[in-house]
Amino acid sequence: MQADLILFWVFAPISVASAIGMLVMRNAVHSALFLIVNFFCLALFYLVLGATFLFAVQIIVYAGAIMVLFLFVIMLLGVDGRVADARIVCFGVGPRPARVRDAERALVGGSPSPSAFAEAGRLTSAAVDPDDDIHASRGYRKRLAGVLAARALAAAALEAAA
């Protein structure tokens, strides 16, 4: 019984600290690593409680799945600083969401720069075909779609660099 308490009091603060670290990290990679630490601490708690099946599931499924997802994200983003893949979808500019494939193609393979984001915004404005209504005109919605796409891309690039 004493060993159980020692193990708990050693790993409980680590578990809480890793959960807080996961929430406050701006870098998604660091946040995922803190999540994995938290999963391992939780698995040890299951082991202490005598739940060996849950211990194994926690390690294999959750920690293993997070690692595979982590590797997938690295492959998707690329390691050379270029955009490996991009998806741009606009909502509120027609009867259904509109995917802007021309802007996506313009981004893929290039470096994430303000000029690339401005071009993607221009292509987004050209691709959408919104309707007029009492809230906004067609021209305003076209312009806003491009501006918001460029801003979202710039924000995503800053987040990825953090």
Image (cartoon, helix red, strand yellow):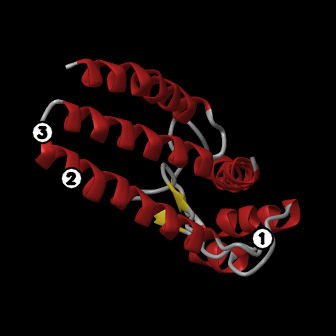
**Which of marks 2 and 1 precedes in the sequence?**
2
Mark-to-mark CA distance, 2 and 3: 9 Å
Residue 32: x and y in percent read 51, 48
The residue beneath circle 1 is 81
Callout 2 touching callout 3 (CB < 8 Å): no
Identity of the residue drawn at 76% across and 53% down: 161
Q: For residue 105, which quarter of the picture?
A: bottom right
Q: Secondary structure at mark 3?
A: loop
- Front residue of 46 and 128: 46
Identity of the residue drawn at 81% across and 68% down: 116
Mark-to-mark CA distance, 1 and 3: 44 Å
- Front residue of 60 and 103: 60
Q: Amino acid at mark 1?
A: Gly
Circle 1: is it few (<14), some (14-19), or many (20+) Cα within 10 Å? few
Q: Secondary structure at mark 2?
A: helix
Circle 3: is it few (<14), some (14-19), or many (20+) Cα within 10 Å? few
- Front residue of 17 and 106: 17
Vertical comparison of 52 with 98: above or below: above
Residue 13: x and y in percent read 46, 21
Residue 142: x and y in percent read 65, 55
Query: Nearer the observer, disc 1 or disc 3?
Result: 3
Callout 1 touching callout 2 (CB < 8 Å): no
The residue beneath circle 2 is 56
Task: State the mark number for residue 51.
Answer: 3
Residue 130: x and y in percent read 54, 56
Identity of the residue drawn at 40% across and 23% down: 12
Circle 2: is it few (<14), some (14-19), or many (20+) Cα within 10 Å? some
Q: Amino acid at mark 2?
A: Ala
Quadrant where the N terminus sits is: top left
